[in-house]
Amino acid sequence: MPDVILPVLDEREALPWVLARMPPGYAPIVVDNGSCDGSGTLAERLGARVVREDARGFGAACHTGLVTATADVVCFMDCDGSLDPAELPAVAAPVARGGAGLVLGARHGAWPWHARLANRVLAAELRRRTGVRLTDLGPMRAARREALLALGLRDRRFGWPLEMVLRAASAGWIVREVAVGYHPRLGRSKVTGTVRGTTRAVRDMASVLR
């Protein structure tokens, strides 16, 4: 069954709900990216495997989780309560069956207009460059661990999710998306929930496109 990589930076408020909703057989790996609120300690107490990555950056945390994982199929998702782990099997199933190399969860719900607009623009540019038709570069996704490692992703900031899709498309992978719900996050917004966070993510992704 899949390992689930959860990059975490001060997500103490959301952790109990996220870990409690993890589907049977899905093993959470919490990557503590410098939390000051005791997120890592709480995650350990709740039964998750916890590793620490001191180099700040979404991509840095995801990469550490990837090299820590041992399952054939790995999943990624935010740990802020905006995504429901119960939907992970729908995302992982096409990869496990061999019907896709990479599957992304396309978020549906009341997510912020600035994040929706940024994703629409990036998805259109991605389609123009690669032919891959996506509506959302969402953070819930699944792929095979060894194949993902072989892509050699280099970005360690918010460009990491986009680089994954670009390299997967370049390698000839089948890239698909499935619909998943989006919920108001728990705790303070750092990226999707703020204009400043969205701007930072777009800047990092634009750097990857260049």
Image (spheres, rainbow, N blue to C red):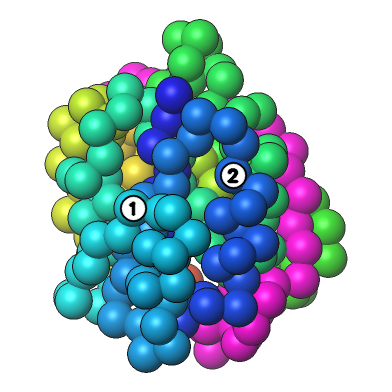
Residue at 34% in and 44% down? 164
- With 79 as the anchor, is 117 left or right in this view? right
User: Left or right: 202 with respect to 64?
Assistant: right
Whether residue 69 is in magenta: the answer is no
Q: Which residues are magenta?
A: 171-197
On the image, the x and y values in percent for residue 151 come to: 21, 35
Find residue 12 and report its horizontal and vertical position in percent.
Answer: 52, 78
**Residue visible at 56% across and 55% down in the picture:** 19
The image shows residue 43, relative to residue 200, as above or below, that is: above
Quarter of the image where one finds residue 67: top left
The label on residue 18 is none
| Disc 1 element | strand
196 or 39: nearer the viewer: 39
Residue ID at (60%, 65%): 16
Q: Which residue is mark 2?
A: 22
Q: Amino acid at mark 2?
A: Met
Q: Is residue 172 magenta?
A: yes
**What is the secondary structure assignment of the residue under circle 2?**
loop
What is the three-letter code of the residue carrying label 1? Arg
Side of 109 where 26 appears, left or right:
left
Specify the quadrant of the image occupied by residue 3: top left
Up/down of 202 relative to 199, above or below: above
Residue 49 % position (x, y): 33, 53
Seen from the viewer's position, the closer of residues 124 and 77 is 77
Left or right for 189, reference 45? right
- Reading the chain from its start, which is encountered first: label 2 or label 1? 2
Q: Which mark is residue 49?
A: 1
Residues packed near mark 2 inside 10 Å, few (<14), some (14 to 19) or many (20 plus): some
Number of numbered markers: 2
Whole-angstrom CA distance, mark 2 to mark 1, is: 13 Å
Q: Nearer the viewer, residue 55 or 155?
A: 55
